[in-house]
Image (cartoon, helix red, strand yellow):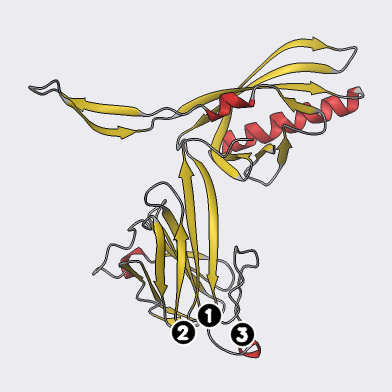
Amino acid sequence: MTLYYEGSDGTIIDFMGGDLAAQNVETLAANSWKYASISGINGGRIKKFHKDAQEAELLVTVLSDNKDDFDATMYQMHRTFERDIRRMTPGKLWWNGFYKEVYAIDNDYEDFEELFESVQKTITFVSIYPYWIKSLSYMFFPEMDTDELTGYDYPHDYMFDYGISNYSKVVPNDCIETANFRIKFFGPYTNPYVIIGENTYKINTALVAGESAVIDSRTKKIEKISIIGKHTNIFNLRDREHYIFTEIAEGNNLVVRPKSLAVEITIYDERGEPDWI
């Protein structure tokens, strides 16, 4: 399996390689729901379920060949974990392609062996949004010759390479129930929109070549990204006839958009447990 921490600056702490070996990975997959209930004549009922912040402990063995390697490993972990806390920016704990946003809030040590350059380290992670997440991206290109695509800035890694797109496609949502999403429109286009299932996602703005606009249902943000990467809040330019943060329905969703519009749709598979080993 893969298990590593990705710091907010991109630093990787691999718990399954090098000088580190995780001992009790199953503790990270613990999953619990809280509930609110109301009393009634027949004993009451559950009103809703929700998740609070969750903590999990990971026992890691640190074993190095020499003191320099040991010191460097310990320093990198401390620096990476503490930097994210000071920046108030969570890192990502990755497990077999799923990640959970976490902070490493506590580090305890035992069984330090100076002669063998080893120690047992217990790391306590806290997650404010305790879901394991996998993002699945689908790219729809405009229907035009390749030579006409100059000036577009597209991402490169997608589940499918659609080549020349048709007017409509089907995007599957294999998540449990509805799913959060991120929709990214690429310029040039005026008033970009896409219909996914039964809902329309539209922004009343003009995009020039090299610009893009993003709708994110998790953060409830709508932003325009300039050619130089500047983000501008354009929440007030959303189409008000349809709720723009409507989550993507489970199952196969028909996607309809203008032929000349490039759009990327990312679905977030969010669950209480990641895929197991």
Q: Quadrant of the N terminus?
A: top right
How packed mark 2 is, by other alpha carbons closer than 10 Å (few <14, some 14-19, many 20 or more), is some
Q: Are marks 2 and 1 in contact (CB under 8 Å)?
A: yes
Which amino acid lies under the numbered mark 3 shown in the image of this protein? Leu
Q: Which residue is mark 2?
A: 259
Image location (x, y in percent) of residue 225: 51, 68
Image location (x, y in percent) of residue 197: 35, 66
Residue drawn at (38%, 77%), measured in percent from left and top?
205
Residue 149 is marked as 3
Left or right: 75 with respect to 58? right
Which amino acid lies under the numbered mark 2 shown in the image of this protein? Lys
- State whether residue 136 is above or below residue 156: above
Residue 165 is marked as 1
**Pointer 3 or 2: first along the chain:** 3
Q: Nearer the viewer, residue 172 or 182?
A: 172
Q: Nearer the viewer, residue 253 or 229?
A: 253
Left or right: 276 with respect to 19? left
Q: State which quadrant residue 195 falls in.
A: bottom left
Image location (x, y in percent) of residue 148: 61, 89
Q: For mark 2, give the secondary structure.
A: loop
Residue drawn at (53%, 66%), measured in percent from left and top?
138
Q: For mark 1, give the secondary structure.
A: loop
Residue drawn at (59%, 40%), measured in percent from left and top?
91
Image location (x, y in percent) of residue 106: 59, 22
Q: Nearer the viewer, mark 3 or mark 2?
A: 2
**Cα–Cα span, label 3 and label 2:** 13 Å
Residue drawn at (44%, 64%), measured in percent from left and top?
223
**Pointer 3 or 1: first along the chain:** 3
